[in-house]
Image: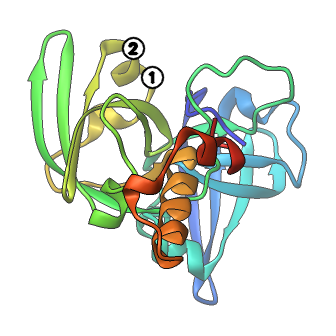
Amino acid sequence: MFTGIIQHVGQVRAVRPVGDGRRLTIDLGPLAEGLSPGASVAVSGACLTACRIVGAEADFDVSAETVSRTTLGDLAPGERVNLEPAMRLGEALGGHLVQGHVDGVGEVRRIGRRPNEWTVEFAAARELTDEMVLKGSVAVAGVSLTLTHVGDGAFGVSLIPTTLAGTTLAEMNVGAKVNIETDVIGKYVRRYLRQLSSSGGRPGDLTLEKLREAGFA
C-alpha cells in the first residue's frame, strides 16, 4: 500500500525486453538504502517488486500485463519516474490510500500554467471517471491529487509548486500519457451499486443502513 506522496524522482538506467515484458533498472537514489530484494516500490504509480539491488540501482521485472495496462512499457533510458516505497504500518497517511494497481492510462488534454498553480485536464475512459467524485482523490503517475472537476471521460486537477518541484508532473505536455488509479473506496461503492442494480434494486433503494451493512459507513 502507498500514499501517493512521492519521495524521490529516479532515473531509468536500462530497459531490457524479457519475453513480452520488460526488466527496468532504475536509480533509486536515497530510497535504495534499507531496501532489499522483494521490496515493493511504486514506479510512476505502478507497484513493482525489486528483484535485485546493487548500490543505488534496482532491477524490476514488469509483466506483459503491466506493460499493456500502464505507461511503463514506453519507458526509455534517461527518463525520470516518480518513486514511492511501500508505506510502513504506523506511518502518517499524507495523501490517500493508493494500491499501486493502475486502472488505466489517461492523456493530458489541456494545461493552464500560472506562476503559483497549474491546472491540468486529462482525458480518460468513462469507466474511470465514473469512479471519481469532485474534491475526491486520484493518483496520477503515482501522485496523490485532488479532483477539481469531473466529467464523462475527462477530469481536472490543480498542481501547486511543491508538487511540480518534487515530481515528474512538471515535465508533462499536451498529449502525454500518464498512469491513473482511482480511489479504492470509489471502486467498491461502484461495484456495490452494480450488484444492487443486478439484483433488481434501484439507486433510490440505497439507504444509510444498507451502506453500513456493506461496510461503507
Vertical placement of residue 157 versus 19, above or below = above
Looking at the picture, how far across and down is residue 122, in whole percent? Answer: 22, 49
**Amino acid beneath label 2:** Thr
On residue 40, the disc is: none
Looking at the picture, how far across and down is residue 61, in whole percent? Answer: 70, 68
Q: Dots 2 and 1: beta carbons under 8 Å?
A: yes
Q: Quadrant of the N terminus?
A: top right
Report the residue at 58% width, 88% height from top.
20
**Left or right relative to 25: residue 68:** left
Q: Quadrant of the C terminus?
A: top right
**Left or right relative to 173: residue 171:** right
Report the residue at 46% width, 66% height from top.
70
- Which element type, helix, strand or loop, lies under badge 2? helix
In this view of the protein, which residue sits in the foreground, 186 or 65?
186
**Amino acid beneath label 1:** Gly
Q: Residues within 10 Å of mark 2 (few under 14, many from 20)?
A: few
Vertical placement of residue 192 versus 110, above or below = below
Residue 59 in sight: yes
Residue on which disc 1 sits: 166
The residue most toward the bottom is 19
Residue on which disc 2 sits: 162
Looking at the picture, how far across and down is residue 34, in whole percent? Answer: 88, 31
Looking at the picture, how far across and down is residue 50, in whole percent? Answer: 78, 55
- Which element type, helix, strand or loop, lies under badge 1? helix
The residue most toward the top is 116
**Left or right relative to 76: residue 56:** right
In this view of the protein, which residue sits in the foreground, 10 or 6?
6
Q: Residues within 10 Å of mark 1 (few under 14, many from 20)?
A: some
In this view of the protein, which residue sits in the foreground, 80 or 126?
126
Residue 125 in sight: no
Report the residue at 65% width, 49% height from top.
99
Report the residue at 31% width, 14% height from top.
161
